[in-house]
Amino acid sequence: MTATQHETTHTEYPAHFEPPHGSAWRLVFGPGLVRGVWVGALGFVVGMLVVLFCRYWWNWDPVWKTDIVLVIGGMVTAPIFFLGGLGAFDYWLYYISGRPTRPEDHSGHGARSWRDYFRVNTDHKVIGVQYLVTTFVFFVLGGLAAMFFRAELAQPGLQFVDSQTFNGLVSVHATLMIFLFIIPAFAGLANFAVPLMLGAPDMAFPRLNALSYWLLPIAGVMFLASFAAPGGAFASGWTGYAPLAEGQPLGQTFFNMGVQWAGASSILTALNFLVTIITMRAPGMTFWRMPLLVWANFTTSLLVVIATPFIAGSQFFVLFDRIMHTDFFIPKGGGYVLGYQHIFWFYSHPAVYIMMLPGFGIVSEVISSMSRKPIFGYRLMALSLMGILVLGFSVWAHHMFVAGMADWLRVPMMVTTLLIAVPTGIKVFSWLATLWRGRIHLTTPMLFALGFVTMFVIGGLSGIYLGSVPIDIHASDTYFVVAHIHYVLFGGSVFTIYAGVYYWFPKMTGRMYSERLGKWHFWLTFVSFNVTFFPMHYVGLRGMPRRVFDYDAAFGDLNFVISVASFALGASFVVFAYNMIVSWVRGPVADANPWHARTLEWQVSSPPPIFNFDEIPQVVGGPYEYGVPGARHAVMSPAREAEEVPA
Amino acid sequence: MRKALVQVVAIGVVIGVLVTLVAVLFQWLPHSATVQFDRIQDIYWFATIMSIVIFSLVAAVVLFAVWKWRVPPDDDRDGPPIHGNTSLEIVWTAIPAFLVIVLGIVSAIVLSENGKAGDNPYHVMAIGQQFAWKFQYPDSGGFTSGELVLPVDRQTQVELSSVDVIHSFWVPQWGQKQDAVPGIATSIFVTPTRTGEFAVVCTELCGLGHATMRAKARVVSQADFDAWTKEQKA
């Protein structure tokens, strides 16, 4: 049975559920984006009326208060109504209200035309692609913000933007890249690959999966909309430190609330991954036979579920201080300023691993299959992920070595921070050992994986400098830190996202990308990345603080070089975008298994059948048994003839 | 196998020499002007040597593997099924653990040395306010100045506070940095070793004027310092 036959089985909407009205009626009142928009607008009015009514009822003056109306109407009720209008709650609402729920006819599953990507879809493969396309759109927008402030930074002094706009661009750049690109792009890749790798027909909770995706654009729109707020976009950095954030104009509220929606999206996805990985493994798929990408997403999901509520809390406290006049972080009212940083970093340090562990998983897949060798030290690779998970929760205060926290906390936090180098080192050395005596195919995903290994080592080593408290006291809050995070998050995370997108592109689209353009993309990115970020180590150590629009004239020449290189880095994305779009439309048709990989997603057609496996695979061995005579990862029956397909 | 190892080491040495040149030919750190920063620079060099060795090793293996074992796209044979090597894995767990623990111990010692008040520290108060620094001299009569003037070779405790949001006090050549936090008292110690003019830079984003929140810092001889404080009091 192939994908085509499934399409004929499921394309037609079962007759008894044909809506009774015409297509115009269905467009406006049926689930979809159109209904989402008008119901969302209705939600804003409802929220606004609730606020006005309450303020009128309790005689609060003035009755109209823009920031409260915006928080309740614009950032709570409107998004919820939008999701309802979209149809994300349809099944549950039918069930709750006692109406007959639609039997699962799979009409909301899979994509038959491009339109199916713009509605609530329960197919993990469609959701994976939705995630990736959306996150790359935000990657471009976050990158454009960076281009603007790099133009400003090309010379000392203020040239193009005012200082509020500059701070806003810096803050929105970081926020989009973290919450709308790196974290969800990994969620997208994992959404596509993990159920296939497990031998499962879908995620454990497909409807929840669809909901988690649709929460994401809400957060992105909120962050971007802050530019339209009076006073400009939120401008206290992506860290939004109190008490600075408390006195900021309205735009800050968009950050406080946007993080809630992005966080909710991450938590729901992570829960879904955990349940899927624990309960939906194919027969024979023991934990020690899972591919390392699955292990990586298992640990990442644990991090997300445990840590993300803390950033939600930190932003709610700031919001309450801002609009309800509480004093959580205001010293005059008895608040504790450093409390914000402790809560914030208790999420945001593990978040660094949320942004890195899935990349470790991707690179393990790519290096193993492109070197045609089993991953070296498989069990220790999985255990080191768990080691990073545990240690990752005990290092948050290394962001606060100069913050004025209790002195005794510094040395223990330094020791745990430095010890994270051990499991990380195990992973790097094991990848190198996997390369050793391999038969190396230097394809585009492999280039990005090897680029990742070398660049991530630089980021890890600058992390060792910053982990040592005395060096950190000098380097903290300078461009050295900016260089460090970009070596970790760009040379690290973004390179692995590129590796993953190229690696699974044939599986997702059924077509092959252009290897030649892929290599151009790699080398342009690799060179311009290094010219952009390596000099930042230098200007930082020499005395340039981060988040400044103006700086000592001595750093002018280097900043000009950095800005020019950053434009080249931005331009290198065009090569990628062109390659992806053109190859998706008319690239050569891809084989089911172009990399001769052993994991389960490559054992089905490209793109995979609508329910992934026509027959449940029986897992009989490890996922990376390259070169072992007769070894198999799974036994699959050959595809059945069309006549045997049950109706 | 032995030949491969020798070749990797050779490539690693070449890379190591190149990276070492980058590390020593550029003046990566500002010329130190305090006892505290001298100590920090020692750890910096320890970490740098460690980093050069590790980076050269990793880069050498990647380059060597691609050079030596690359195959054409149509090659569909598998590599040797090597699943692991326990003694090797123990080695590359133990060596990094040892190195970072040594770095941690050295760092803890320097941190403790740099946090010592000394016999008789001179007190200066630095007060951050959007977007300027003010300096008070309680040990010399309590006057306030817009520039920070310190005597050379004298242990000084800079006590930090803020009246609005978080600021951070940093003089790049002094190597010491500390946030000024509303509601919390923080301080750092500096013992300037040479006279000269420096800049106090705010390193914590504090609002619109953060980039321009700077003050002049001067380190002068004790005699000049006494003359300056007398002049300020008058």
Image: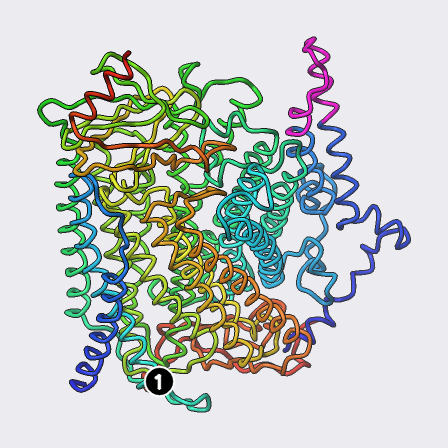
Q: Residue most toward the left?
A: B119
Asked if A547 appears above or below A117 in the picture, the reply is above
- Residue A611 at x, y percent in the picture: 60, 67
Taking depth in this image into account, of A228 and A206 the one nearest to the observer is A228
- Residue B135 at x, y percent in the picture: 32, 22
Q: Left of B113 or right of it: where is A96? A: right
Taking depth in this image into account, of A430 and A469 the one nearest to the observer is A469
As for residue B205 lying within the magenta part, the answer is: no
Q: Left of A61 or right of it: where is A553? A: left
Q: How is the image coloured?
A: rainbow
- Residue A161 at x, y percent in the picture: 60, 43
Magenta stretch, residue numbers:
A48-71
Q: Residue at x 59, y 54 (%)?
A: A144
Q: Residue at x 24, y 12 (%)?
A: B141
Image quarter hosting the N terminus of chain B: bottom left
Name the residue carrying label 1. Answer: A439
- Residue B13 at x, y percent in the picture: 20, 74
Q: Left of A513 or right of it: where is B52? A: left
Q: Residue at x 14, y 29 (%)?
A: B154
Asked if A346 appears above or below A527 in the picture, the reply is above
How many numbered callouts? 1
Around disc 1, counting alpha carbons within 10 Å, would you say few (fewer than 14), some (14 to 19), or many (20 or more)? many
Image quarter hosting the C terminus of chain B: top left
Q: Quadrant of residue B59?
A: bottom left
Please give the chain letter of the residue carrying mark 1.
A
Q: Which secondary structure, mark 1?
A: loop
Query: Which amino acid does the dot numbered 1 rest on?
Result: Arg
Q: Left of B164 or right of it: where is A159? A: right
Report the predominant secondary structure element of the magenta stretch: helix
Q: Quadrant of residue A590?
A: bottom right
